Image (spheres, rainbow, N blue to C red):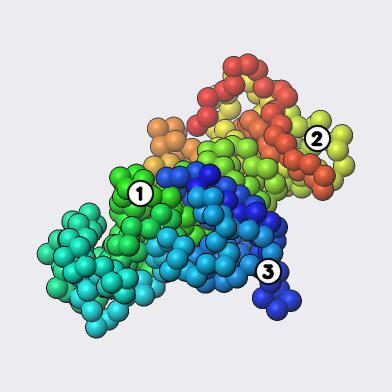
Amino acid sequence: MHVEVRGLNKKFGTFQAVKDVEFSIAKGQLIGLLGPSGGGKTSILRMLAGLETPDEGDIVFHGQRVNDLPPQERGIGFVFQNYALFKHMTVAENIAFGLEVKKWPKAKVKERVAELVELTGLKGFESRYPHQLSGGQRQRVAFARALAPEPQLLLLDEPFAAIDAKIRHELRSWLREMIDRLGITSIFVTHDQDEAIEVADEIMIINQGRLEQKGSPWEIYKDPQTPFVAGFIGESTIVEDIASLRGFADAAIWPGTKGLIRPEYIEIGKESEFSLLSATEAGKVKHIHFRGSEWLVEVAVGGIKLVTYRSLEKEVLHPGDAVQVLVHRAYLFNDNDSWVMENKLKEDPMPVHI
């Protein structure tokens, strides 16, 4: 493995910021550290960078323990949330700064700067100062500067947080393309689920200093290993009395079991749209929201409020409409375990999702 972390712990005073974190990353992967604010993501990143020292545990890069190495000897590049560019330096000077500190030959510095300017799409901006650039351009300069010394590991702390939504989306695609082209192992911190899902090869969910789960975006979404991950990833509704829903009576076997139901687990429509009414519930539309590519529908089933999607190709529903609701599956959890349960009353094959 290119990066290994073993038994990592870090306290700030009495606050346990990182608790027994262990993971490994293969060379060339792009990993997203995802979780709520204050969960420990940035603390982990800063320990990898050498900006914080672990209280316990080992950090290993390509087979070498680096706990005691200073940042400049770890072979890393670091991109900060606020860019951290030198205001009095031009684009070219910012990119060259680290190389000049390392006393690279002038000709080699010039060649490397030209290469990175071309790679990051900054050609023609070499003589501009940071205040003359857009947010997206400044982030590209920060990225180029981090890559200049040819690091083996790239660390990014909320790299798109200070950029508006449209440019942020463009930069996500650009970053993914750059990482693929360079083949550099990269780790980025984010609290944006869409960003992590779109960009990362694998996601590590960090909560209260612990690593809750590590896997591909699809693996984490379809098979959450903890109630926190299930509730954190995607939109969902917690149902306290899941056994009261048709097809889930078996959940009553485990007292205290709750259900988490994602919008795509639910099919909604008029009675005429269903061939299997024995597995559906009677519901009433409470609210409907246009989401561009689909409708987001809030529906009440007895005393339970559920949220689901509905295709624009289907008949438009309105608040107050009586509908049938088919819950295909639910993620069940209690104090001891978690698992996915399918609706027991459904016919095979499974009805098509709307």
Residue with the mark numbered 1 = 179
Q: Nearer the viewer, residue 84 or 48?
A: 48
In the depicted structure, whether residue 90 falls above or below residue 197: below
Q: Nearer the viewer, residue 228 or 82?
A: 82
Q: Nearer the viewer, residue 140 or 182?
A: 182
The crowding category of the residue bearing disc 3, from other C-alpha atoms within 10 Å (few below 14, some 14 to 19, many at least 20), is: few
Q: Nearer the viewer, mark 1 or mark 2?
A: 1
Which amino acid type is shown beneath numbered disc 1? Ile
Which amino acid type is shown beneath numbered disc 2? Ala
Residue with the mark numbered 3 = 55
Considering the numbered disc 2 on the image, is that residue within a helix, a strand or a loop?
helix
Which amino acid type is shown beneath numbered disc 3? Asp
Which residue is located at x 36 percent, y 71 percent? 83
Q: Nearer the viewer, mark 2 or mark 3?
A: 3
| Residue 82 located left or right of residue 135 | right
Which residue is located at x 57 percent, y 51 percent? 4
Considering the numbered disc 3 on the image, is that residue within a helix, a strand or a loop?
loop
Residue with the most extreme top position:
348
Residue with the mark numbered 2 = 251
Q: Nearer the viewer, residue 29 or 328?
A: 29
The quarter holding residue 159 reads bottom left
| Residue 121 located left or right of residue 136 | left
N-term-proximal mark, 1 vs 3: 3
Which residue is located at x 36 percent, y 45 percent? 183
The quarter holding residue 124 reads bottom left
Q: Label 1, label 3: how many angstroms apart (C-alpha)?
A: 32 Å
Residue 125: % across, % down: 15, 67
